[in-house]
Image: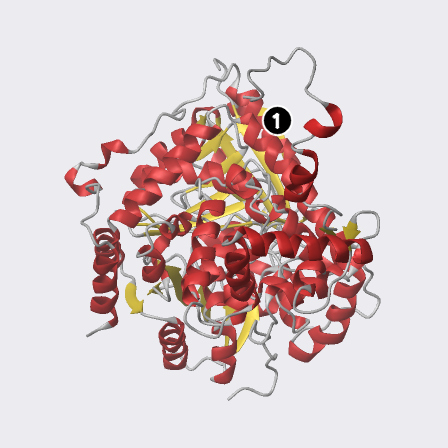
Amino acid sequence: MTSGRTINTATFLGIPPFPIAAREALADSQLRGNLRHATHTIRTKRARVAAELDDWEQLRVAAADIKDDVLGNMGHYLEQLEESLTRAGASVHWARDGAEANRIVIDIARRHRVEEVVKVKSMATGEIGLNAALEEAGISVWETDLAELIVQLGNDLPSHILVPAIHRNRSEVREIFLREMGKVGMPAEADLSDEPAELAGAARRHLREKFLRAKVAVSGANFAVADTGTLVVVESEGNGRMCLTLPEVLISVVGIEKIVPTWTDLEVFLQLLPRSATGERMNPYTSTWTGVTVGDGPQEVHVVLLDNGRTKVLADEVGRQALRCIRCSACLNVCPVYERVGGHAYGSIYPGPIGSILTPMLRGVGTDEATDALPFASSLCGACYEVCPVLINIPEVLVHLREKVVDSHRGGVPGTLQAAMTGASWTLGASRRLALLQRVAGLSGRLLGRRGLIGRMPPPLSRWTDARDVPAPPRESFRGWWARTDGDRKNAGPPPHTPRKGGEQV
Amino acid sequence: MTAREEILRRVQAAFVRAPERPSTDTGGNQWIHRDYAHTRDLPDPLALFVERVQDYQATVIRTGPDGVAAAVAKSLAGARRVVVPHGFNPSWVPDDLDVVRDEPALRADELDAVDAVISSAVVGIAVTGTIVLDHTEGQGRRALTLVPDLHVCVVTANQIVGDVPEAVTRLSSPVSAGRPLTWISGPSATVDIELIRVNGVHGPRTLRVVLVESPTT
């Protein structure tokens, strides 16, 4: 067991459904300011470097095609990848779900009798809650990406795929470093300022001792090349290189959708990913490794191929395109909803538009209220689809999932929406009932409406009016107006030069 | 049923119909649209490479074959204890260095105590300002060009290609041979705090490139 130096790892469990979490996030003006600055800066840079390549659209089409080839022949490529990895000296493990993947990683760490592992930022390990599982097993986990370190030391949750601590400002980071670093290793200097360069320096010193002594590292992978068995990690800080190079044992948890068929296919993705993600022509460091290289880097290499719901996504004919995702986060940065509420409201490691489709499909529609709320966390404006480097039609999948959510709720106790629809069906089904209701509405509109709008209505209608103004019903319905004026003919007469035939107007 | 069998079964069950398109091994994925640019027509790839490397706040010195040692010395800027990988061109090593060899292999903490590393490379990419190492002769194992705080990298003009597809093609044989690769675009960097770019977190905080041109280029 460890000496009590472990950090409690926060999880997304218990985050309220999107509409409630979003309301809290919207009230946080600091958060909104940070998010606005971050998303606008990255989206401007992305647009600039994407425009530099005149074959950008062709690259997107190629990327989508290559990923579709992988999805359509997943079994073949998985077996090919396994064979290539094994040939290159790696041990291949298969994990049906997160719990199984976590057990595999824990078993390997225990076999090496380590009390700690260093970790490269990875979405897949975040998805399966690996850190919490390792700590429960008495193994300390050191996140080595600067933002992940800030999140971990602050016992906090990531809020963006690429810059997970974007909700924190520099003085908060300074406080976290001063308060927490000493508890788990080399403390920050007492006179640490809140200059980003100084804060990064503190992280460098704090983590270096951990890198130099680490025996086991855990990573994900951005790509896994089926025909060569090569894994690829794309990063900026060099923490990835440290983890992939210095320890004796390397365990990489790789979602089965990370496959690309051939080494050559990377010529497409290594152009699209950095430009879409950070808006750079190329990220500072990309590492590729193929199993074990004698005399260079870890001499024991494990790869855990992770399903955890991915085959469920694969079975959804409309939704499977989400498995093309290369986790660039361009869709977050252009999303008007994400920009305002941030990542935490989505209650998942995958926030933003891609999270709104991926999370419900990985977890399964109908699992819980929070998951089912996600496909509705969008205005369907389509900005995400426009920037997606692998052409995922996110709005299409959102609408598809909304339908599935509604379907999954049929047959139970009718919700407000269903009650309203049933009422509408009854009212619209007979003209007398509609006319009566409209007269009542016209009267109440005079009572409720100010400046032609109704601001607030009582529950359950407040769920609509809390976020939207409802136009007050007009004093007179169209049907009433038509009956009274005969379509305006009684008052104004026919428009000039309109031919009339026997009292009938065409 | 093992996890492997179960996942492969799920994959197969995911498609009610057989996959619409055949896979690579049968040569059947010709339907993939690959009409993006496979080469880029650049008026002066070397100049572009220099400009793009400098965009990342790395310095570049252009020199002829006779000036390499001097350019490396200048790039080292006073660093004394320098790791020189096996197979690095001896005529490129400046005099008066305290040369540290990786034979026998240095421990990570020993590497942490040197001032700098000099290495060669295998490919340079003009459009992206990237240098690629395949960690063969003259480049050392991966840790050598990672732990020291200053990396001086010597690239020759014939190693410069236009863009990523040309680099991927050239790198195909080291990858097939199982070599690891490191693609380097400027010094280590982060924007994790308020999106302000800070150079140098864990990798070398300073990258200096020496570009060697033969008299005819």
Q: Chain of mark 1?
A: B
Color scheme of the displayed model: secondary structure
* Residue A213 on image: x %, y %: 53, 71
**Residue A407 appears in which quarter of the rendering?**
bottom left
Q: Residues within 10 Å of mark 1 (few under 14, many from 20)?
A: some
Q: Amino acid at mark 1?
A: Glu
Residue drawn at (60%, 87%) of the image: A4
For the residue pair A12 and A299, the one nearer the viewer reads as A12
* Residue placed furthest toward the front: A502
For the residue pair A479 and B42, the one nearer the viewer reads as A479
Q: Is residue B86 above or below residue B51?
A: below
For the residue pair B165 and A456, the one nearer the viewer reads as A456
Which of the image's four quarters has the N terminus of chain B? bottom left
For the residue pair B133 and A119, the one nearer the viewer reads as A119
* Residue A64 on image: x %, y %: 38, 40
Residue drawn at (50%, 52%) of the image: A354
**Residue A348 appears in which quarter of the rendering?**
bottom right
On the image, numbered disc 1 is attached to which residue?
A: B51
Q: Is residue B122 above or below residue B85?
A: above
Give the SS element for disc 1.
helix
Residue drawn at (60%, 12%) of the image: A499
